């Protein structure tokens, strides 16, 4: 499925380059770069993407689906990344709903999903994934990212980016196929067991709504149910979660 790639040594952002090429072809493809000078995360936050320190990539997919189905896409993708880190690198890690992977209390991976759609449905998904592979703790501290970690910090071994990429692509292909063909309910229990937010009182922010509460369940459409301190139930489609 994902057998085409644009590979660069330096770009502003793989996400920007992927969007620039999205109309060149009807195929799926990935965009990779050793370094990004303008890597961005959710909420337009800066995403540090130093040369050869991580996997900085964007995956362009072409599903034939209505827009509403997109609400569970991130959940399938997060499982793909989580299982590669756990099964191939033997490092315990958890999904922080909806867009991050954490090792303990430190972030190792973030991703963001954008799409091009019209009334007929989704035309393209552009999923940008950043995975910290070879940074040292000093490198993170220097850029005020003491809450970040890399696979190298966690298992003491240098990580070969293309090796990581090849297993990740297989995992993404499998989970993408499931995303298209299975209801989320089929993998919901697995997802919940790999997710870190249960049984904790956390602050959830979505737009100008902010509540302090505990996540209790995830719906079949991917929405998170949170119970606030006063006992009210709230549904979040996405949220910024402070841990
Ligand atoms: C986040 O945690 O907020 C998401 C981070 C996403 C970073 C990746 S790196 C490859 C792609 N290009 C970007 O500019 N951002 C994404």
Image (cartoon, grey):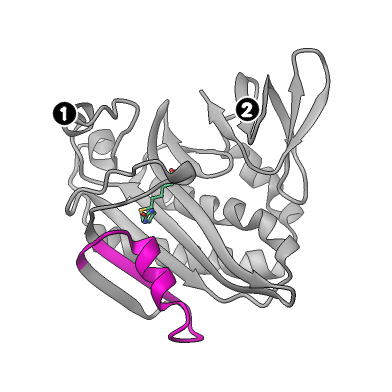
Of mark 2 and mark 1, the one earlier in the sequence is 1
Which residue is the site of mark 2? Answer: 204
Nearest the viewer among 67 and 171 is: 67
- The relative height of residue 192 versus residue 35 in the rendered view (above or below) is above
- The relative height of residue 106 versus residue 121 in the rendered view (above or below) is above
Disc 1 residue crowd, few under 14, some 14–19, many 20+, Cα 10 Å = few
- Give the mark toward the camera: 2 or 1: 2
Q: Is residue 212 part of the magenta span, yes or no?
A: no
Q: Which residues are magenta?
A: 9-33
Residue 33 lies in quadrant? bottom left
Residue 183 lies in quadrant? bottom right
Residue 138 bears which disc, if any? Answer: 1
Q: Are marks 2 and 1 in contact (CB under 8 Å)?
A: no
**Residue at x 46% of width, y 41% of height:** 101
**Residue at x 33% of width, y 44% of height:** 47
Examine the rendering and report whether any part of residue 125 can be seen: yes
């Amino acid at each position: 499925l994902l057998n085409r790639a644009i590979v660069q040594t330096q770009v502003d952002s793989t996400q920007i380059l992927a969007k620039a090429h999205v109309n060149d072809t009807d195929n799926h493809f990935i965009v990779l770069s050793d370094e990004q000078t303008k890597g961005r995360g959710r909420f337009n936050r800066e995403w540090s993407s130093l040369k050869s320190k991580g996997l900085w990539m964007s995956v362009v997919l072409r599903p034939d689906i209505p827009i509403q189905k997109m609400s569970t896409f991130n959940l399938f993708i997060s499982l793909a990344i989580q299982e590669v880190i756990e099964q191939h690198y033997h490092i315990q890690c958890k999904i922080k709903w909806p867009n991050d992977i954490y090792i303990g209390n430190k972030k190792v991976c973030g991703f963001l999903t954008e799409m091009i759609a019209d009334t007929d449905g989704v035309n393209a998904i552009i999923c940008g994934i950043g995975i910290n592979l070879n940074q040292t703790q000093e490198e993170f501290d220097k850029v005020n990212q003491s809450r970040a970690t890399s696979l190298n910090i966690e298992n003491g071994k240098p990580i070969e980016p293309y090796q990581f990429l090849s297993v990740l692509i297989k995992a993404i292909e499998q989970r993408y196929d499931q995303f298209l063909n299975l209801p989320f309910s089929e993998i919901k229990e697995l997802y919940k067991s790999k997710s870190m937010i249960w049984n904790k009182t956390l602050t959830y922010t979505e737009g100008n709504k902010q509540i302090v509460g505990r996540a209790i369940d995830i719906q079949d459409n991917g929405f998170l149910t949170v119970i606030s301190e006063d006992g009210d139930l709230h549904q979040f489609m996405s949220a910024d979660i402070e841990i």
